[in-house]
Image (tube, rainbow, N blue to C red):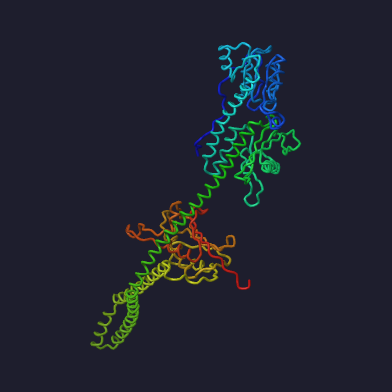
């Protein structure tokens, strides 16, 4: 999935010039991972940290004493090299540097400071302010310039504006990351992009998302894509601490409460609580290596806002998942209702047809049964006639022999074949009428006009075994039911439904030569104490769409009948009959590559007094 709003990596607002090799230079290494002001630093200070660089002790002291301690924490450096050494150990919100310095020029200092910490704003102080000086300051990345000697109130306002600019600038990537995070719709998408989105705001070596178990509420690792082995109990302890305090918790390897003592490579960790409303929703833990700095106040703030958005994104993903499941259930229920309504309509039509056809069917059935009886009588009469003809022929009298010849001509092989064909046709017609009556009866049952037959506790394994020796099937049947499987079903309904399912599997056209010798497997067993019958065909490959509508009554082309159209009711009837007696039928892809019908049956009730 492509994220709609992608938060870019943090970039500097400009590309500062490299410092001259003759003057000061930044230490080697990646400056973006140098330490910012830690939570412990800000807790013991007045607020905004200011690095003052001036070679005049009086000027440094003036700023240190004059700026309100409730607003500013002032740290002094006597020159560019001293400032670089300080910035290698911690970070500052803003720096004030003199344009003239014994060990470097002010412009050079500005370039090095901005190179080491692009987030820090730099203000240049000079006794000789000119437009050329201002342009040079801006060229090297300075935020503003101020005249010396310092006007404290003016300096205070410039410092506050610089910090406000930095704060506003930091909101842009936060906004972009928030848009990207909230555009993710599912939990899997949130987890897939969580690491890179968090990295855009707070640099880290690894992260862990700790979410509570739905049943026990105990925090567990939900996402750990880096493969770093970390003690779960330590992560759980740190995350729980942040949740209980309802605020971020920052620890370093030098602290007494450092929970990752066995892991030598870790140097700092920050745990953010995740909360939805008043309910805790987990914790996001960011980790840094031993050579990396502790987390700064600005990172704490950005991470806190990100964690709030993360908690909201996870909750939104959960709600989306529930909504999708409900929509799927609604669509499935609607589909079931449509299927049931189709068959109910067909059942009501069948009920009317049964009423209209009952007398003609009964009359035709009686007539055919009578014809069958007549055929048997005619066949007996024909055999007797042939016996009489042979007896007459044995008398040797010409008149009797002629009569015998005429009787044998009437009862010859053609007459015998005609009598047998009439008997067979009558029996087939009676069998067809019985099948029509059975189909109409099942349809009437689906219409609701007829009650479902009472269920009984039944061992289904003998029903499956009867299919093993059926000679009229076009496919062999293998039954795997070594033990009794007891279900609470209607025998007649289960038998008719299994007949339809097995007939469907055996009669489905197969394209591979010799495939008809592949057996259809019938298996009965218990699945989590629920009786279940599996009907597996390794050759029946169905698409997902075909599996979803296989039990739907539909008009389809019958290629076996000369490409005619017919109404497919077999599986639809089996499905609805089984549903009405509390069973559940589904078709699934099989491990063999084919398809399997899974029939979950109602559990037999315990015996009285059991």
Residue 97 point in image, percent of width and height: 65, 17
Residue located at (38% from left, 67% from top): 348
Is residue 514 depicted above or below 35 in this figure? below
Is residue 441 depicted above or below 404 in this figure? above
Identify the image quadrant of residue 282. Answer: top right
Work out whether residue 157 or residue 393 is closer to the camera in this orientation and state it.
Answer: 157
Residue located at (55% from left, 67% from top): 487
Residue 69 point in image, percent of width and height: 70, 26
Residue 543 point in image, percent of width and height: 45, 51
Residue 606 point in image, percent of width and height: 60, 69
Identify the image quadrant of residue 109. Answer: top right
Work out whether residue 366 or residue 207 is closer to the camera in this orientation and state it.
Answer: 207
Work out whether residue 558 or residue 106 is closer to the camera in this orientation and state it.
Answer: 106
Identify the image quadrant of residue 75. Answer: top right
Please tell me how many numbered marks the rendered image carries: 0
Position of the C terminus by quadrant: bottom right
Work out whether residue 468 or residue 534 is closer to the camera in this orientation and state it.
Answer: 534
Residue located at (33% from left, 59% from top): 565
Farthest right residue in view:
256
């Amino acid at each position: 999935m492509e994220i709609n709003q992608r938060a870019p990596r943090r970039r500097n607002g400009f590309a500062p010039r490299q410092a001259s090799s003759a003057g000061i230079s930044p230490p080697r290494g990646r400056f973006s991972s140098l330490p910012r002001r830690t939570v412990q630093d800000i807790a013991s200070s007045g607020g905004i940290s200011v690095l003052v660089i001036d070679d005049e002790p009086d000027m440094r002291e003036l700023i240190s004493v004059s700026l309100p301690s409730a607003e500013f924490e002032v740290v002094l450096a006597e020159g560019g090299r001293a400032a670089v050494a300080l910035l290698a150990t911690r970070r500052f919100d803003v720096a004030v540097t003199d344009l003239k310095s014994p060990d470097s020029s002010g412009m050079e200092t500005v370039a090095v400071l901005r190179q080491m910490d692009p987030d820090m704003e730099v203000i240049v102080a000079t006794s000789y302010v000119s437009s050329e000086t201002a342009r040079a300051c801006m060229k090297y990345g300075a935020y503003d310039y101020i005249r010396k000697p310092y006007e404290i109130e003016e300096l205070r306002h410039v410092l506050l504006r610089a910090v406000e600019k930095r704060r506003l600038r930091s909101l842009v990537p936060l906004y972009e990351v928030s848009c990207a995070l909230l555009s993710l719709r599912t939990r899997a998408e949130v987890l897939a992009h969580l690491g890179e989105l968090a990295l855009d705001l707070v640099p880290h070596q690894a992260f862990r998302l700790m979410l509570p178990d739905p049943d026990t509420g105990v925090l567990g690792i939900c996402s750990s894509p880096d493969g770093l082995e970390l003690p779960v109990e330590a992560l759980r302890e740190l995350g729980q601490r942040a949740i209980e305090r309802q605020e971020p918790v920052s620890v370093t390897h030098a602290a007494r409460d450092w929970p990752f003592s066995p892991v030598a490579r870790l140097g700092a960790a920050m745990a953010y609580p995740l909360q939805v409303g008043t309910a805790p929703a987990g914790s996001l833990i960011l980790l840094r290596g031993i050579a990396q700095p502790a987390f700064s106040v600005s990172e704490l703030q950005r991470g806190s806002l990100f964690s709030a958005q993360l908690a909201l994104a996870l909750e939104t993903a959960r709600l989306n998942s529930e909504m999708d499941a409900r929509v799927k259930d609604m669509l499935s229920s609607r589909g079931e209702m449509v299927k049931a309504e189709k068959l109910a309509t067909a059942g009501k039509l069948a009920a009317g047809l049964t009423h209209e056809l009952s007398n003609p069917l009964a009359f035709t059935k009686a007539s055919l049964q009578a014809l069958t009886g007549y055929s048997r009588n005619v066949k007996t009469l024909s055999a007797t006639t042939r016996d009489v003809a042979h007896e007459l022929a044995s008398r040797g009298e010409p008149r009797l022999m002629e009569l015998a010849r005429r009787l044998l001509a009437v009862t010859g092989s053609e007459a015998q074949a005609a009598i047998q064909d009439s008997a067979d046709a009558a029996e087939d017609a009676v069998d067809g009428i019985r099948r029509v009556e059975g189909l109409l009866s099942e349809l009437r049952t689906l219409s609701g006009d007829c009650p479902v037959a009472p269920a009984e506790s039944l061992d289904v394994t003998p029903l499956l075994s009867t299919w093993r020796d059926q000679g009229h099937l076009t496919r062999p049947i293998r039954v795997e039911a070594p033990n009794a499987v007891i279900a609470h079903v209607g025998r007649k309904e289960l038998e008719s439904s299994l007949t339809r399912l097995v007939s469907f599997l055996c009669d489905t056209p197969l394209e591979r030569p010799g495939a008809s010798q592949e057996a259809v497997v019938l298996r009965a067993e218990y699945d989590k104490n629920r009786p279940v019958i599996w009907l597996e065909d390794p050759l029946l490959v169905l698409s997902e769409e075909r599996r979803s509508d296989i039990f739907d009554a539909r008009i389809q082309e019958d290629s076996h009948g000369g490409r005619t159209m017919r109404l497919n009711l077999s599986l639809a009837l089996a499905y609805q009959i089984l549903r009405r007696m509390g069973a559940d039928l589904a078709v699934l892809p099989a491990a063999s590559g084919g398809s399997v019908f899974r029939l979950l049956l109602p559990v037999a009730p315990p015996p009285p007094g059991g």
